[in-house]
Image (cartoon, rainbow, N blue to C red):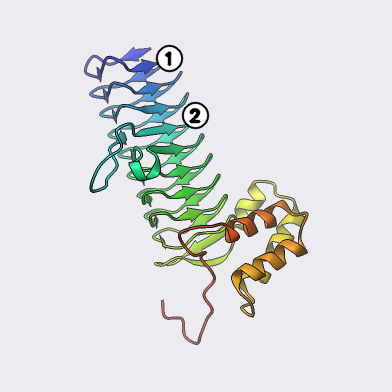
Amino acid sequence: MTIHPTAIVEDGVVLGADVEIGPFCLIRRGAELADGVRVHSHVVINGATRIGARTEIYDHAALGGDAQIRGDRATAARLIIGEDCVIREHVTMSAGSPKGHGLTRVGRSGYFMAYSHSAHDCTVGDGVTFANGVQLGGHVDVGEGANFGGLSAVQQFGRVGRFAFVGGVTGVNEDVIPYGMVIGSRARLTGLNLIGLKRRNIPREHIHALRGAFRVIFQDDSKTLASRAQAAAERWPEIAEVQEVVRFILADAKRPVCTARRRTGVETE
């Protein structure tokens, strides 16, 4: 391993093979860096933070700090980051809080651009992409492969489903379905992330079924959202992606599901 002489690595830090720690970094007692982790300069990694193998952390990132909340903080708060992530300049990821059982978890192969933030008790899936300045409030659940445009933000306790796309400068205060695409200063559902579906080699017939289910669920307001979702589940019982969207809609959640806004005359936004 390579540790720059200006770096501070406290007693009790666990370092794997081939770890590189650059100048003026601070790695606090209790942190664990797996094999091949590379830490650039001026990075702070707090205790009870585990970094997966081959993850690369750029200048001035701050990982595993106390939850940014009023009141008591978790005494055994943790942050776990998966393998092969890229964490760019000034990224912050908080440890958990007592209300969230003390754990923030980030999956493998994520790409987190400069100044993005994952707050306390978030669960972030594998292969996500956060553009510059993306902000997650506390207790947010982000599914695998979700993609966030720059300066977008998700409100506390929100959910963003697998392979969803959130446009830049979008405020997400409602849950985003898997494979959905949302845009707007207050997020509105505009359709499916078809480009993402194709890139992930989802079969054509499954994409057609998803489009049909989308119309049934979101473009017909004659019944409740739950009943429309159930109708889609019954119509496409063999399509895993449709069933996933339906389960997401019917799940017990703290926020409503983001839906398409109907045009009523002149668009005002």
Position of the N terminus by quadrant = top left
Horizontal relation, residue 241 to residue 105: left or right: right
The three-letter code of the residue at mark 1 reads Asp
Crowd band around label 2 with a 10 angstrom C-alpha radius: few (<14), some (14–19), many (20+) = many
Displayed quadrant of residue 181 = bottom right
The C terminus - image quarter: bottom left
Q: Residues within 10 Å of mark 1 (few under 14, many from 20)?
A: some
Picture layout, residue 184 above or below residue 54: below
The amino acid type found where label 2 is placed reads Glu
Which secondary structure lies at badge 1?
A: loop
The residue at which mark 2 appears reads as 83
Q: Which mark is residue 229?
A: none
Q: Position of residue 99 (x, y in %)?
A: 36, 45
N-terminal label among 2 and 1: 1
Residue visible at 36% across and 51% down in the picture: 137
Say if 116 sits above or below 193 in the image.
above
**Residue depth check, mark 2 versus mark 1: number of the one nearer the observer:** 2
Give the spatial CA distance, label 2 vs label 1: 14 Å
Residue at the bottom extreme of this rendering: 265
Which residue bears the numbered disc 1?
18
Q: Quadrant of residue 57?
A: top left
In this view, the residue in front, 84 or 80, is 80
